Image (cartoon, coloured by chain):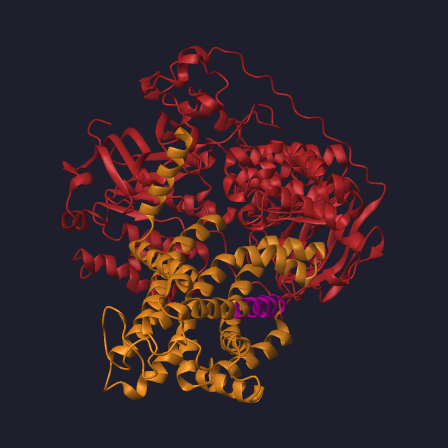
Chain colours: A red, B orange
Amino acid sequence: MNAPLLQVDGLTIAYRRGEGWVRAVEEVSFSIGAGEVLGLVGESGCGKSTVALQLLGYRHPGLRVEAGSVTIHDQNLTDLPRVELDRIRGRHISYVPQNPTTALNPGMRVGAQVGESLRAHGKAADTDLGALFAQVGLPDDQAFRRRYPHQLSGGQQQRVCIAMALACGPDLVVLDEPTTGLDVTTQVQIVALLADLRARLGMSMLYVTHDLTLLSQLADRVGVMYAGRLVEIAETGSLFRTPRHPYTKGLIASIPQAPGNAGFGTRPLRGLLQRGALPPGCPFTPRCDHARPGCAETVQRLTPAGAAHQTAGWRASQLVHESQVAASEPPRRVPARNETLIEVKGLSVAYGIAAPVVRDVTFTFGIGETLALVGESGSGKSTIARAIAGLLAPVAGEVLLRNAPLAPLVRLRSREVRRQIQLIFQNPDASLNPRARLATTLRRPVEYFFPDEVHHSLQLAQTALDQVRLETAFARRFPDELSGGERQRAAIARALLARPAVLLCDEVLSALDVSVQASILLLLQRLTRESGIAMLFISHDLAVVRLVADRIAVLFRGEIMEIGTADRVFAAPFHPYTHALLRAVPKPLVRLADRARMARAPVGVSPPPGRGCAYAGRCGWKPSQLCHTTMPPWQTAPGGLRIRCHLTPETLSARAAETLPEEIFA
Amino acid sequence: MVQAASAAAGYRSLWRQMPLGFRIGALMLLAHLILAVTGPFWAPYGYSQMGTGIPLSGISWRNPLGVDQLGRDVFSRVVHGSPIVIALSLSATFLGLVVGAAIGLFSGYVGGWVDLVIQRLFEALISIPFLVLALIAISAAGVEASGSPVLVVLVVALVYAPRIARIARATAIDIATRDHVTVARLRGETAWSVMRRELLPNASGVLLVEFALRAGYAPVLIGSLGFLGFGMMPPTPEWGLMISENRAMLLVSPVTVLGPGLALASLVVGLNMFTEGLARVLGRTVRLGSQ
């Protein structure tokens, strides 16, 4: 890397707050070489997006650059006038935003939108739009380009955004969390596409994300940001194998699928980033296990640590030799399966008069057992939870609690039944009343379900806060005074106060940062183990599911494809869809060598619901035309694993053996 | 001592952060309130005292806003009328808010055919021009009730309630889809309990702004009723009624109408500037609270 393409020097950006300015980004310096992929990783609010946008010379109107420069082609982007910037943006540096749904103009055909950026740079005449679309794996026909954004899937929309970014052949593409809103399988395809494009076009990328695992597959170097500072920057392999900064170590330890993280062996990060209470020195001091008195006062600058590895921790050289925290996997509790708690029989649920989104789903789970529902978005996971909770009436089938059938809707159920089933939502911001103090929110279930205990409801609320590891003083706070993870804990505390028999956890981790996810997961695991509460854990993330679930049900388009104990689901034989899902789970440091095949996974037409296998259209192992015409039978594999497929378990095992073992996350 | 000084400094800086319109409006309102509370004690004449000067004689030191055709001092009448106008406007708007918000939140939360019926009813009420609606209500109440302040309050509330209810309903529909309301529904809470605990606290910002905006227009509405002779009865020094009484002599002595007109205008402008500022300030904090 002799001449870097882009150089960022001591960039400091501040935002206006009241009368003064607060620094969002402080003295960030890095460079990106020609053809290099630099990853930028950090928790939400660490300033990584602010840095990314500044590379295009853009910042929000409330922000100002206090110091530093961003140099590309001998031009400093921080003080160029708007007209000059317009010439550079799109042509030399382009941008792929996080959410393609809002990034595309809904009233404009996608072909015209891509053409727009070509016209802006006067290249409309000599560029073939079809070739551009083909380059990003989209159909190159005219008809496709005449579609509107809402007629495309999320993955296709993101591809259009990428095509737009590539339109003028830029030197550098800035990608701001481009796969965060997408499904695991779609995510793999987009990452494979990016790796492929990079190999073919040799352009540089800055990839901003909170997902370290994903970066490890794509990036040459990774910069770790914390509270507006770059705390470590190193080559990907070196960063993963020998992280120097305590924060990086914590971040890697928080990844469920990181090497050696069989359970929660290594310590995940504790505490939270609280921007209001940062010490003048190293911002990580309040959460650091290795902090020394000097840390809080002294600003630590990046110092070289080994070849192409820089870190901002002054004790880094000592830390390498400190003993690793002994990994101890929590003993897996043997589920007491002697009594069935919830039984779902032939459940079908529909919204309005449309075709059912959940068809003929049957499963049971016992007292104290954790059942995970896994599947991509739109597979009906949440719909099943809502039907069990009584928010949606099933069109067919029924739900039984302790062998007694439940009324379809919540208002028809008895208070006792309502108390026993508690739902926890994905987004903790919306699930707490913003205008009520936590004490009010937490005391309400006690008042409602246990009128006899009203006189000490406050103590009960405080005990519940303690149970979810929140300070009892939090009872006086409003939800907006808490962080996302703390709010989710409060929502869990509220559910616990009803003393439920079963918790329905609907994607409870998706809205949280990686480091917070691990602690919430630990909490749920401990609570279910201590109190014997059963849990229906809904998630799209197989790595997370593997850590909590006793049994797993894999859902596709509203039908269960495979159901069995966790170890059985994660071992051959696999249902073809489970197999695809497992291959899609990103693994640290495993390059996407021949996973590029995934990018061209067959997308065929599935038979209409009820007329054949729901997965037939996407199945790579399709045995025959049979799949399109006949519903597949349930096959029973050893260990009670049940798979819905026309292929026998033996054939499925043989097929699974054909793939390389390291390709499968299990 | 130090604490008091710092608290005062805190309020001063808070005051400086408020929008300019809010500050001007607040000062105008404060002047009106002081006038309303203290006015009756220092007004030079009684509101129905005659012979305070030569009728329609114009502005003089003795009668700063002139003398009306019956020889009453217009300035004294404006001062005496101030508490009446403010009390009527605020109580009428408040009544409209309570009724409108309760029905609107309920209608929005429950939905279905209940919502459908209530909304069509309210649309019918809103489609009648408000003065016509007020006149229908007053004539329905009968001759005996005419001129009673209670009737005026009820009529203005009747005009306002459907309009406030629509805003409350829209807010309720928005809030009802949030997860914390779903949690309450899953618990099996009654509609009344959900409205009180979950909807009302979150709609309070919107409702407060709505109250303030409506209160700003209430004096005009009450004045219009008075002007048409359907509001308060003479000799009540209600400003709209005063304008109406002196309207006939407008060409002879325009100045007699100026007093109540200016008073009414400054109250309405003050209320509007105050509420517009309040909406901006609250809008900001309400958003912060719900993020």
The answer to whether one can see residue A566 in this image is yes
The answer to whether one can see residue A622 in this image is no
Side of A564 relative to A440 (left or right): right
Q: Is A219 situated above or below A423?
A: above
In the rendered image, the residue lying farthest to the front is: B51
Side of A479 relative to A545 (left or right): left
Question: Residue A383's spot in the image, x, y percent?
Answer: 64, 57
Question: Residue B226's spot in the image, x, y percent?
Answer: 42, 81
Q: Quadrant of residue B50?
A: bottom left
Q: Which residues are magenta?
A: B96-110
Residue in front for this viewpoint, A484 or A19: A19
Q: Quadrant of residue A129?
A: bottom left
Question: Residue A12's spot in the image, x, y percent?
Answer: 27, 32
Side of B130 relative to A446 (left or right): left
Task: Please tell me which residue is depicted at 46% across the width and 46% down the height of the picture.
Answer: A187
Residue in front for this viewpoint, A623 or A468: A468
Task: Please tell me which residue is depicted at 22% across the width and 72% down the height of the picture.
Answer: B60
Side of A481 relative to A563 (left or right): left
Task: Please tell me which residue is depicted at 30% across the width and 34% down the height of the picture.
Answer: A36
